[in-house]
Every structure is written in C-alpha cells, then in structure tokens.
Image: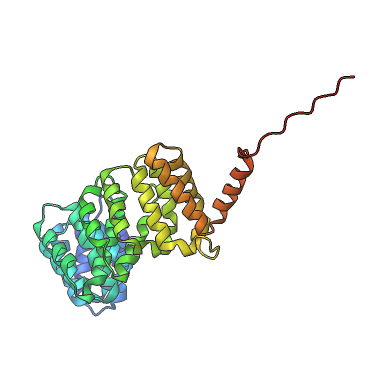
Amino acid sequence: MSALSQICLSAKPQAFDRWLEILEKHQTRSESPAVWSALAHRYFSYLRQADHERAQVLLDRLFAMFPSILGEVRDVRLMADLQGWISPDYAKRWLAVMAEQGENGLQGSGEVLMLRHAWRQGEGWLSDMLEELLTSIAPDTALQRAGVAHTLIRMWEEPTLRALGHGYLLRLLPSEEKPVRDALGEMFRLRSSWPPDQFTWEIMDALAENPGLFLDGRAEHFPEILEGLVEYQPLRVAKLAHVVIDTVGAHLADTASGWAFHCESLISVALRLQDMLGEISIRGVELFERLLEFNVSTAAEMALSLDRRTPNVGVRPRLPRRRMKR
C-alpha cells in the first residue's frame, strides 16, 4: 500500500483518482488498524488535493471501522491537518469519535477543536462547543480543556491569533485541574512571546490572582520575562515580582531548584526599579530587601559589594599631618 501510494502521488500529473480507488478497494478487505494508521500518518495529508467529497467518505468509513486510530498521538497532527478542508459535519463527527479514544483522544480533540476555531471563526458550532467545554465541571472533560490550553499557548505565540485566544486563556488560568495547569505552564518557556501590550498586562494581572501557577517548574524562567517588561510597566512588574517571591521564596536560595539560577533577573528588576523615580524606586528597594530576607546569595554578594564601595559618611575624615617648621 505504501509503494502504490508513492507511485500514484509521485506521478506527473499525480494520480489522485487512481490512488483513492486503491484505498477504497482496500477498505473492503480485512486489515489491521496499524496498517491504516501508518498510511494515514504518512500519506493522508495529500487527500486535501484529491476530490474532497470522495476523500471524506473514505475517511468517515475508515474512522467508523477503526476508531482507535484517532487515539494515537501521531494522528492528532493528521486530524489537525484535515481541519483545513473537511466540512463541519464530518469535523463534528470525527471529533466526537476522537474524544472516545482514551486520554490521547480526549486531549487531542480539545487541541483540534480550538485549532479549527482559530482557522474557521465563522462556524458558530465551534464557539458553542468551546463554551460548553469551558463551563463544564465534569472531571472526564479535564483533558479536553488541557488540549484547548495547549493550542491556546501556541496561539499566544502568533500575533494574528493572540486576540482570539486571549479571552479563552484568561478563563483557563484560574483552573485547579492538573492537566490544564500542566498545559498552561508552557507559557513560561515562551520568553520572546510577551510583548508589551494589553494582552500581556491582563495575563500578568491574572497570574497575580492565581499564583499557584508559579509552582510549575517551568515558571523559573518568568523572572527573565519580568526583566524584559519592567521599563514598560514598572509597578505591575514590581507587584508580580513580590507575588513570585511570596509563592516560591523558599526555593530561591535552594541550589537544588532551578529558581536559584534565575534570581539574577529578579535582582536586575529590583535595581532597575530603584533607578526610577518616586514610588517606583521605593518598590525596587523593597524588592531587593525581600531577596536578602530569603538569603538569595547573589543579592547578598551584591549588597556586600555595594557596602564596601560606599564611603562611611558618619566618620570624620582624618586631616593630613602637617610638617613641623624648623
């Protein structure tokens, strides 16, 4: 089947009708789902160039015969690719089948649902399904919400999709569900995807209200994000830096955790705040003092260095001795 597919797809011009005929005939034979999964993974992305109605009928029959195919991790990408051209009716049916295929299928269905919504915002059923999913409290839908969160994090990186995903992301941030939190933790790795815009400020405010997210190991990169934003929103950054310290302060001096190696960014934030005027400077002093309270070694070393270079203004300088006249 692989050889025949390759021959049809490499022909000039490509023999899509002949390829579909081969696949359709093979569906009438007894076959292992592993064979179809391998074919799907390698070749089914080419179906977008074939007759769409015929291709959708082929896939619909295949997923009815072997629904477990939609529960494999590698075939989530296939389902995502299909959303670019399949009709809403088929999309609904296959996503429902996918959600019944165990943990991978549940999470994958959430990922694909959010992705299709990003691509096809005019399809109202997608908004309805997402609304139903995000308002659900059923434990068995947590993985679907985690899938939605995974796609939202990817959308956060795309300037053209940030606005669409922003509202959904804000709604998921307060979640206490572990799969959702695990998915959201990936946002801390995206150090280049936090531009100084309103969406970022609102996400930062939401994080301040939901500090438990900083317990994720990937959050150790967040001080670097704050360092890049301090000049734009110093008071907001100062507030969030204090929230971070409140939440993970015990780990800041622990070299066994990653936080100890990212404290320099918090120190940099504190010093840059001190260089600003008025209340902002005071916030910088407070932040630096809190880092000292938690025995952050780099802050202690810097404080000692500054102390050595600062003259003791309370001690009267000694005058040079005069030479006696002979």
Which one is nearer the viewer's eye here, 298 or 227?
A: 298
Q: How is the image coloured?
A: rainbow
| Residue 271, image x, y percentages | 48, 43
Judged from this view, the residue extending furthest toward the top is 326
Give the quadrant of the N terminus.
Answer: bottom left
Q: Is residue 79 visible?
A: no
| Residue 98, image x, y percentages | 22, 71
Which one is nearer the viewer's eye here, 69 or 229?
A: 229
Q: Quadrant of residue 247?
A: bottom left
Q: Quadrant of residue 95?
A: bottom left
Q: Is residue 175 left or right of residue 129?
A: right
| Residue 239, image x, y percentages | 36, 51
Give the quadrant of the C terminus.
Answer: top right
Q: Is residue 310 left or right of residue 239?
A: right
Q: Is residue 166 left or right of residue 270?
A: left
Q: Residue at x 54, y 51 (%)?
A: 299
Which one is nearer the viewer's eye here, 45 or 135?
A: 135
Q: How many marks?
A: 0
| Residue 21, image x, y percentages | 19, 65
Q: Residue at x 32, y 50 (%)?
A: 157
Residue 248 higher or lower than 289, as above or below: below
Q: Residue at x 79, y 28 (%)?
A: 321
Residue 215 higher or lower than 200, as above or below: below
